[in-house]
Amino acid sequence: MGHEIRVLETKAELKRAAAIFYAALVAWPPPKADDVSEFYEPGRCIGVFDGSELVGTAASFTSWLSVPGGRRIPQAAITDVGVLPSHTRRGVAGALIRQQFADAAARGEIVASLRASEAVIYERFGYGVANSVVSVEIITDRARFRPTVPAGGPIRLIDPLTSWDLLAKIYDPIDHPGAIERHSYWWRGLQERVCRQDEVQYLVVHGNPGSEDGFAWYSPLNSDAWFSGKNRTIAVSDFIAHTASAYLGLLRFFCSIDLIERVRLGTMPLDHSLSVLLTDGRAVQTIGIRDETWLRLIDVEAALAARSYAGHGSVVIGVADDLLPANTGSYRVGTGGVSRTGDQPDLTTDVASLAAAYLGGTPWWQLALAGRVTERSAGALALVDSLFAVPKAPFSGTMF
């Protein structure tokens, strides 16, 4: 089919776009509000039309991505990509994604990232899994902190419905690789979801008033059988801690709540330190690992130049990018900088694999094992892994 793509601007178009996205997800109801325009950044929601009918939609937010070395680079935070079930497999999603690439490049956004509802869609458009996260449970009656672990600072419960400005202020200094900006539209969307949910939710912050440095949400699971069931569990979400004191203080608080037998932390870095904090490390159980950041490099040279590199030396990486052919070429990458080069590549790869390795979340040797990277100079694979190495696993912790 031919695709007419344009920016959606009216309240009616945006409401229809929201309905299409939630119809594509199947399981979640659309927002109840008649006017959903406050959840979309103006000019960044696009739609595909089949005649006069809107059949597919995608949106994005102005954002930044924190990369190794501490820089925040401009990115498009891609969200709400959906196609009506009656119009799938007709090229609608591809048309939307290609338009988003062109729009991001025009805005000077050098990367794009998203959270994928399906794992087999986005790699063919040049996205790679740049990091994954782990879900864990702590068995509280076995969770004894080692006597050498500091206590953390003061904790207090606050009203989740009146604390949005405080949460945004606490979040803003975040700078670990993989973290992204939470735009005002992101906060407004979270507020709408919290207000329309029926389950009990609590919000806790760490630090004295005016100097808070962490917060987290938590809620009970299976509350209908709370007093008669076993393994009473709270689910902790959006766990933000800028300091070791905040991290430890919040963890100690969760493990000390009366009636609680398990604490489920749904989104944690792969290299979290929970088990080493406890005298019985087996009190921490991994219950799942999933991909988090799907990353697309819109401007390969600018993205490579924005991050820092470890070790010594340099390597020439040959990159193929079928959708954005201006990226195709060879790049000399090292601690001395990044530049395009006519030299023969030491390694060759595609742009999706480069994106997977970009934050340090996927080792190059794993990509080579999968046949996604070809070593053309002896020792180049070991060298590129040392250059892209990071001290901590990349992590975002922000769903959008």
Image (cartoon, grey):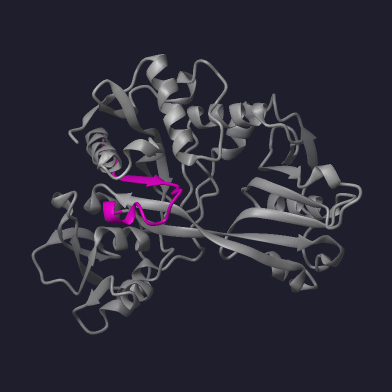
Q: Residue shown at 76%/55% (left/top)?
A: 263
Residue furthest toward the bottom? Answer: 378
Q: Quadrant of residue 224?
A: top right
Q: Which is nearer the eye, 344 or 387?
A: 344
Q: Is residue 103 above or below residue 234?
A: above
Query: Residue 102's x, y, as percent?
Result: 22, 37
**In this picture, is 188 found above or below 125?**
above
Residue at the image position 22 percent from the left and 34 percent from the top? 106
Find residue 132 and report its horizontal and vertical position in percent. 50, 59
Tell me what residue is drawn at x 28 percent, y 39 percent: 92
Q: Is 345 on the left or on the right of 372, as rendered?
A: left
Total of numbered circles in the picture? 0
Give left or right: position of 234 versus 72.
right
Query: Is 112 a magenta residue?
Result: yes
Magenta residues, as a range?
108-126
Dividing the picture into quadrants, the one containing residue 164 is top right
Residue at image coords 19%, 50% = 323
Residue 141 rendering spot, x and y as whole percentages: 87, 63
Residue 137, image x, y percentages: 72, 60
- Examine the residues drawn in magenta and state their main secondary structure: loop
Q: Is residue 375 above or below residue 397?
A: below
Q: Quadrant of the N terminus?
A: top left
